[in-house]
Image: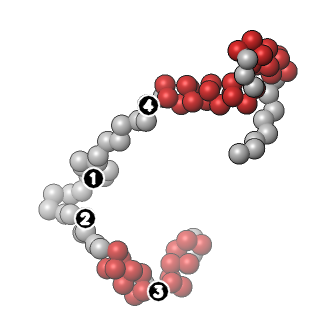
Amino acid sequence: MRSTFDLPDELMRRAKIAAVRRGSTLRDLVAEALRRLLAEQSAPERKRMNEAPIKLPPGHTIPIRSNSEIAQLFDQVDITHLNDVYSGR
């Protein structure tokens, strides 16, 4: 894939010299550098949410709805009223 980058002149000069000394192309040097950098960075471990992000009063729960139930609820909502709410009326 072709990409265009605006790099500092000194960095580009050093990269070209490094590629020549290695007997490779600038393209291969940049690709290898990116591979190494990305390999060093491990993907952050995702944390599973165990608690609600808000504290609910005792006895209150957040209802669990399927996608189809949510779609039905949206169909029942007065869209005009929602537009008023979002417009600050």
How has the structure been colored for display?
Answer: secondary structure
- Does dot 4 land on a helix, a strand or a loop? loop
Q: Are marks 4 and 2 in contact (CB under 8 Å)?
A: no
- Does dot 1 land on a helix, a strand or a loop? loop
Say whether disc 4 or disc 2 marks the residue closer to the N-terminus. 4
Residue 23 quadrant: top right
- Can you identify the residue that label 2 sits on? 62
Say whether disc 2 or disc 3 marks the residue closer to the N-terminus. 2
Mark 2–mark 1 Cα distance, whole angstroms, equals 9 Å
Mark 1–mark 4 Cα distance, whole angstroms, equals 28 Å
- Can you identify the residue that label 3 sits on? 78
| Three-letter residue code for mark 2 | Ile
Q: Position of residue 85 (x, y in %)?
A: 52, 74
Q: Are marks 2 and 1 in contact (CB under 8 Å)?
A: yes
| 10 Å crowding of disc 3: few (<14), some (14-19), many (20+) | few
- Can you identify the residue that label 4 sits on? 42
Q: Residue at x 19, y 63 (%)?
A: 60
Say whether disc 2 or disc 1 marks the residue closer to the N-terminus. 1
Is 40 left, or right, of 20 in this rendering?
A: left
Mark 3–mark 1 Cα distance, whole angstroms, equals 28 Å
| 10 Å crowding of disc 1: few (<14), some (14-19), many (20+) | few
| Three-letter residue code for mark 4 | Ser
Q: Residue at x 24, y 69 (%)?
A: 63
| Three-letter residue code for mark 3 | Asp
Is residue 62 among what the camera can see? Answer: yes
- Can you identify the residue that label 1 sits on? 52
Mark 4–mark 2 Cα distance, whole angstroms, equals 35 Å
Say whether disc 3 or disc 1 marks the residue closer to the N-terminus. 1
Q: Are marks 1 and 4 in contact (CB under 8 Å)?
A: no
Judged by depth in the image, the label closer to the viewer, 4 or 2, is 4
Compared with 60, 5 (above or below) is above
| 10 Å crowding of disc 4: few (<14), some (14-19), many (20+) | few
